[in-house]
Image (cartoon, rainbow, N blue to C red):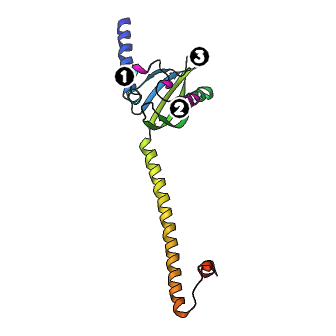
Amino acid sequence: MEKKTKENLIKENKYLRNIIANMPGHVYWFDTNNTFLGCNSNQAQTLAVSSPDEIIGKTPYDFISKERADKLIGKNKEVMKKKKILTFEETFKFKDGREINFISQKVPLYDEKSKVIGLLGISTDVTDRVKLEEELKNANKEKSQLIADMRKAEKEKQILIANVNKAVTGELINPKNIYDFYFL
């Protein structure tokens, strides 16, 4: 009976490891010192390690700049201190030059005595969405500028037509008094 229970536990452990390894998004967990205890395959690939086991014992400083790692660790500490799920939008510039934007949800991990022993994070790569939002914002600025330019050109055209008409009748409009022409 004991042998069968042990075999079942081993089988279940492998099954759960397989689920975590193949989950969509990025799954990772840290201890209270912000040392990686594990991750899934997506996270390992993003961190440019060959397997999730290679991340164990490393810290964010091994993968991202000190400034970004300090921010990440600060957010992780906030999650563990507040003892609740927090959601962050995070941008990481990796040491190899890649920059990736994530929406991350992090939750504290507890031991059997309800003491915080680390945190679990699940992050989704939203880099494409962020780029599209930036492109849309730039396109809206360009559109607004184009509309403003068109309005200005239309006013100038109206002034030119009015001046031509006034020239025929001998009453030229002084460009310095354009305001009077339009608004009085």
Residues rendered magenta in the picture = 53-75
In the depicted structure, whether residue 174 falls above or below residue 146: below
Q: Crowdedness of circle 3 by 10 Å Cα count: few (<14), some, many (20+)?
A: few
**What residue do we see at 47% from left, 62% from top?**
143
Q: CA distance from mark 3 to mark 1?
A: 32 Å
Q: Quick one: 116 or 7, which is closer to the camera? A: 116
Between marks 2 and 3 in the image, the one whose residue lies nearer the viewer: 2
Numbered label tally: 3
Res. 1 in view? no
Res. 68 in view? yes
Q: Quadrant of residue 128?
A: top left
Residue 87 in percent (x, y) is at 54, 36
Residue located beneath label 3 in the image: 113
Evaluate if marks 2 and 3 touch, with contact meaning CB atoms under 8 Å apart: no
Q: Quadrant of residue 174?
A: bottom right
Residue 180 in percent (x, y) is at 63, 80
In the depicted structure, whether residue 155 falls above or below residue 111: below
Q: Is residue 69 magenta?
A: yes
Q: On the rendered structure, is 182 left or right of 14?
A: right
Which comes sooner in the sequence, label 2 or label 3? 2
Q: CA distance from mark 1 to mark 2?
A: 23 Å
Residue located beneath label 2 in the image: 68
In the depicted structure, whether residue 135 falls above or below residue 29: below
Between marks 1 and 2 in the image, the one whose residue lies nearer the viewer: 2
Which comes sooner in the sequence, label 3 or label 1? 1
**What residue do we see at 38% from left, 9% from top?**
6
Disc 2 marks which amino acid? Arg
